[in-house]
Image (tube, rainbow, N blue to C red):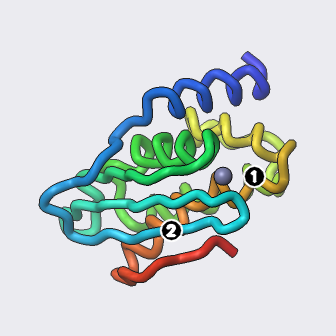
């Protein structure tokens, strides 16, 4: 399957049926993210187990890319510790911006986000959930805006 097919299939699937969608209770930390360029608004809810994410959910409204990216992210970061999540975010960011030509195999389904490269204006849609998760993990329970 080439990256374009992967992009189309994975983004459509996760937009139609977002995984881990809806609030989480109890919640240890959460954050709101807003991408004013597109109008995407997400809230990320996190349950922590020490340094590790025990469970993570999101809700909100946004375009297909922001919703699919958040859905993919919740699946990818569940059970991981902060260092692993930082590493994953670096790989996702490099994939989104085209800094790495081929997405690393460790990305799994997140490699589909490489398709966003063809739409530079949508990179912020795809990265919104990650910035929001970072804000939640930093215990900054204030609205964040993607840079
Ligand atoms: Zn968007």
> In this figure, which residue is indicated by the disc labeled 1?
122
Q: Residue at x 19, y 64 (%)?
A: 27
* Vertical comparison of 122 with 37: above or below: above
Numbered mark located on residue 33 in the image: 2
Foreground of the two, 92 or 40: 40
Label 1 beta carbon within 8 A of ligand 1: yes
Q: Position of residue 40 (x, y in %)?
A: 58, 57
Q: Position of residue 65 (x, y in %)?
A: 64, 43
| Sequence-first disc among 1 and 2 | 2
Q: Secondary structure at mark 1?
A: helix
Where is residue 6, by image quadrant?
top right
Q: Secondary structure at mark 2?
A: strand
Foreground of the two, 129 or 63: 63
Residue 107 can be seen, yes or no: yes
Numbered mark located on residue 101 in the image: none
Quadrant of the snapshot with the C terminus? bottom right
Q: Decide: marks 1, 2 in contact (CB < 8 A)?
A: no
- Residue 77 horizontal side relative to residue 40, left or right: left
Q: Position of residue 137 (x, y in %)?
A: 37, 73
Label 2 beta carbon within 8 A of ligand 1: no
Q: Position of residue 28 (x, y in %)?
A: 20, 69
Residue 106 can be seen, yes or no: no
């Amino acid at each position: 399957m080439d990256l374009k097919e992967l992009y189309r299939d994975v983004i459509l699937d996760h937009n139609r049926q977002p995984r881990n969608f809806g609030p989480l209770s109890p919640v240890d930390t959460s954050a709101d993210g807003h991408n004013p360029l597109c109008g995407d608004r997400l809230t990320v809810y996190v349950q922590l187990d020490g340094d590790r994410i025990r469970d993570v959910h999101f809700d909100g409204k946004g375009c297909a890319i922001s919703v699919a990216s958040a859905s993919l992210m919740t699946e990818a970061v569940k059970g991981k510790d902060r260092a692993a999540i930082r590493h994953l975010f670096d790989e996702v960011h490099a994939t989104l911006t085209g800094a790495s030509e081929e997405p690393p195999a460790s990305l799994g389904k997140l490699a589909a986000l490489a398709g966003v490269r063809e739409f530079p204006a949508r990179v912020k849609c795809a990265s919104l959930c990650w910035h929001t998760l970072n804000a939640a993990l930093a215990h900054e329970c204030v609205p964040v805006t993607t840079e």
